[in-house]
Image: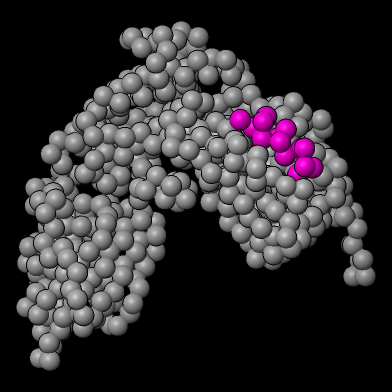
Amino acid sequence: MTTQDLYQQVIIDHHKKPRNFRKIEKPSHQAEGFNPLCGDHLWVYINVNAAGTIEDISFEGDGCAISKASASMMTQNLKGKTVAESTAIFNDFHKMVLGQLDPEKDAHVLGRLAIFSGIWKYPARVKCAALAWHTMNGALSNEATISTE
Amino acid sequence: MNQHTLNSTPSTMDLDAIRRDFPILSRQVRDGKNLIYLDNAATTLKPRQVLDVVYDHYAYGASNIHRGVHFLSEEATKLYEGARETVRRFINARETAEVIFTSGTTSAINLVAKSWGRKNVSAGDEIIITHMEHHANIVPWQMLREETGCVLKIAPINDRGELDMAAFESLITPRTKMVAVVYTSNSLGTINPVRDIIRLAKVHGAAVLLDAAQTVAHTKVDVQSLDCDFLVFSGHKLFATSGVGVLYGKRAVLEAMPPLMGGGDMIKSVTFEKTTYAGLPARLEAGTPAIGGAIGLGAAIDYIQKIGFAAIADQEKDLLAYATGLLSELPGIRIIGTAAEKTAIISFVVDGIHPHDMGTLLDAEGVAVRAGHHCTQPVMARFKIPATTRASFSFYNTRADADALVHAIKKAIEVFA
């Protein structure tokens, strides 16, 4: 992966026009994510219905293009998924950004999120891509504040 | 802008020869890009003249100091104490007893805050720092506040990143025990009017600590002429290796300080009933120090003194003016820190591009800069930004490096267009 791949058009697009970039009033789950190292700071809001499906998910906050695009694509991907499915995707995403899962070789449930594969070659930026996911996972686990240090 | 805005660098030094002294400058990074090193405020590069003496010490002279009777120990002791004398001359301390080797600026400030601070500061006493301090000159004083109940006062800065001297003066009272100030800001580049600061502090009898981490590689520092009580800096920002730094203190002040760490090398005699401490500087240097690091620091000082601060200042002034001129023309850029008195540090933000993305995109072009809050979160809050991208120059940088920086920023702006 080159830096050009890291900043391909879809990432820039999600950064400039983040999807589901809003607050959900009275969400069933929410958490605040913070990367003290670089100041990336976001909130993830989730509404899970009685059947355990994510009916709505959104985020707010400020950060670099990688963290914002990752959060935006995460909300797109997880809307309509069950909590169990979300956890499986989170686990795959986590392995991928650490370089432990190669979407081209290994089985995965990442879909378009595979665009973030190879970010493990930029150790300083792994936390940018992972912040929204850890925050989402924390929200579903009822943790109020997530720090990725 | 000064007069050097055309296409030549000042001819006061042989830049090609100097650049050959730094092996790392011949490196390529990120798929064959020549390294453009503009992260000198984080750490400076190391010349062969330093690396060789450090290598020689460990390869042929490895030995502990001050206690061996054998040849190598005597030799290492002589080199280590010789480095102390080199530092003494470099900052014009009265005597080598006033030069304490530490592990760096952070440990030097912590030593003062914990040893001098605990002894001299009590509830209601005041410590004054500025809004532009590095965390290393904030947190130790907050810890002292926790312990003693003293008051920590913050001198404000203006929109150019300069200290508000009127406000600073009004903060000083007879209860002010310490004024701990950064000489040169690592994130803004501001050079503070330390002589005025020291004069005002002395009116009320306050001690003064200068954090000179970003100063000593760029300009002559004379502790007697300044009349500061403490001055601290790191070896690794002065072309030496990491793990060695200096605490200068006036003898009378250091002598009154209880040792922070007890152990070997800092004692006169030890029995289980009673230990008597050694004199300065050993009393404040418990344990085996960074011997090779200190010897390397001495070599680094010899190296830059051979080049001379006049030539260094000419080169860095030219680079600052040249790079500032080029950067100012870029669309959507905002330079953070525009003090009248500035070192060759340029912090900036570009509309719509987070500094971390900028840092990664510059890195892709081989340009090494720092992106982040630079351990000065209150400065970021003051300017209402999460972070900056920071290019920091040293004398071995060239106008071509500044051109490469600007070219890489333009490419980053295109990626985000």
Residue B316 belongs to the span the image colors magenta: no
User: Magenta-highlighted stretch: main secondary structure?
Assistant: helix
Residue sitting nearer the eye, B80 or B198: B198
Residue B387: x and y in percent read 36, 47
Residue B344: x and y in percent read 46, 27
Q: As drawn, is A60 to the left or to the right of B195?
A: left
Residue sitting nearer the eye, B294 or B314: B314
Image quadrant occupied by the N terminus of chain B? top left
Name which residue lies at 90% across and 70% down: B272
Name which residue lies at 36% across and 19% down: B322
Q: As drawn, is B28 to the left or to the right of A119?
A: right
Q: As drawn, is B69 to the left or to the right of B29?
A: right
- Looking at the image, can residue B355 be seen? yes
- Which segment is the magenta one? B193-206
Residue B263 sits above or below residue B51 on the image: below
Residue B15: x and y in percent read 44, 15
Residue B303 sits above or below residue A96 on the image: above
